[in-house]
Amino acid sequence: MTKILPVVLSGGSGTRLWPLSREKYPKQLLPLVGEQSMLQATVLRLEGLAGMAAPLLVCNEEHRFVVAEQVRSLGLQGAVLLEPFGRNTAPALALAALWAVQGGDDPVLVVMPADHDMADGAAFRDAVGRAVALAATGVAVTFGITPDCPETGYGYIQRGAALGDGSGAFALTRFVEKPNRETAEAYLDSGAYLWNSGIFVMRASVWLAALGVCRPDILEACRKALAGGKADGDFVRVDVQAFKACPSDSIDYAVMERLTGGDAALPKAAVIPLAAGWSDVGAWDALWKVLPKCPEGNATRGDVLLDNCRNTLAFSESRLVACVGVSDLVVVETHDAVLVAHHDATQDVKKIVDRLKAEKRSVAQWHRKVHRPWGWYDGVDCGERFQVKRIGVKPGGTLSLQMHHHRAEHWIVVSGTARVTRGEEVFLVSENQSTYIPLGVKHRLENPGIVPLEMIEVQSGSYLGEDDIVRFEDSYGRS
């Protein structure tokens, strides 16, 4: 039986779905379409296929704890390969393939972005089953989405002759960039073009051999990075300096486009048409298309009231959102930002994010509620020389032993029990009790109980930034 290794690439930032998606907590970690996050839905997408191994996830180091926790909550135990910084998809797949062949294995990799939606899971699994059988023979397989409109936001794949082997695959003729409207209409009319899905199926050895021909510099840098890395629990850390030297490139540009030229030194490539309700959920209009809608075409989430509205997407995170007499709009409210955009302009949301980054505004990167390996904190209020946070600590969660140079902290327990280290003291603080952490004193907060700990923290001082933390000990390996 062919061993199948799902490889989930979770490196995107989802800037076009701001303000719900942020750089430090991007769209693949959010439940945008269903109850599960997009990453969780991707991990479960191949469930039931014979020969499937535990998934391998490749993600940015900053997202490691959330990614691992989301996978664990599904009852799965997959390895998480950490990138210290993004180098696009070709190096990410190189690291995954190198990891997969350790010990002499050569599984078929099913490479999936973590932020896509697939409405028809059964159709997808059927197509993957056929792709795996073909890939086991040494062919590099990709999926092309059967287009239903002249989409200008996707790249396209031109298919050639049918392979005639029962797989439903076609020769892969060429990749083409995002077209203009007239060209996209011609592609649709021809029937020979498919949307580029960014999903690939091939043996690990096939990818490594092809990369060695097309981009030996990427392969060598990734070899050194993995060889110089180390295991850290469920995490696989690569050597930072070696990976820093790795060029950035995509799977398509680095290898797949080269496979259409008939080079005898490269593997054959094929494309399987896929009609499974695929969407890359790349912008708000794409999300609106895949969500359930009322007869007037409206999709809503949260506390939303609509009157005389059509084709409107309205999301509310923290307060009532009311829309009256509008059409073709996207309205998204979060704790700290509101977006209003026309459907036709949702691709330009990235321009707003770019401006926020240029102005060094934190809303480009962080939500008001920030997730940490021990739980979360929510910045409720702030002013000159003070800041108020709600803090939640998971059962067994432990903050680092730390100290601040510029602020003191008051802690009030709302529910649960806190174990507090303050200097040489260690004591419990229960519900409706409080304590004070003076400036410059080593301290630690823990939840020794079996229920979540929630508390209010009031900070006061001359500087309240998150970088005023000196860590002495940390259970999660943070410096």
Image (cartoon, rainbow, N blue to C red):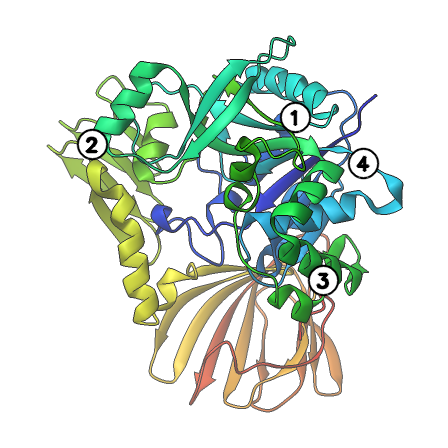
Observer-nearest of 394 and 246: 246
Q: Which residue is mark 2?
A: 306
Q: Between disc 3 and disc 1, whose residue precedes?
A: 1
Instruction: Please tell me whether mark 3 sits on a helix, a strand or a loop.
Output: helix
Label 4 vs label 2, nearer the camera: 4
Q: Nearer the viewer, mark 3 or mark 1?
A: 3
Looking at the picture, how far across and down is residue 348, in whole percent?
A: 26, 48
**Helix, strand or loop at mark 2:** strand
Q: Which mark is residue 445?
A: none
- Residue located 35% across and 72% down the image: 360
Q: Residues within 10 Å of mark 3 (few under 14, many from 20)?
A: many
Q: Secondary structure at mark 1?
A: helix
Above or below residue 471? Residue 74 is above
Give the Cα distance between marks 4 and 1: 19 Å
Q: Nearer the viewer, mark 1 or mark 2?
A: 1
For label 4, the residue is: 106
Mark 4 residue element = loop
Image coords of residue 314 (percent x, y): 28, 37
> Quadrant of the rendered structure where residue 56 is?
top right
Q: Which residue is mark 3?
A: 225
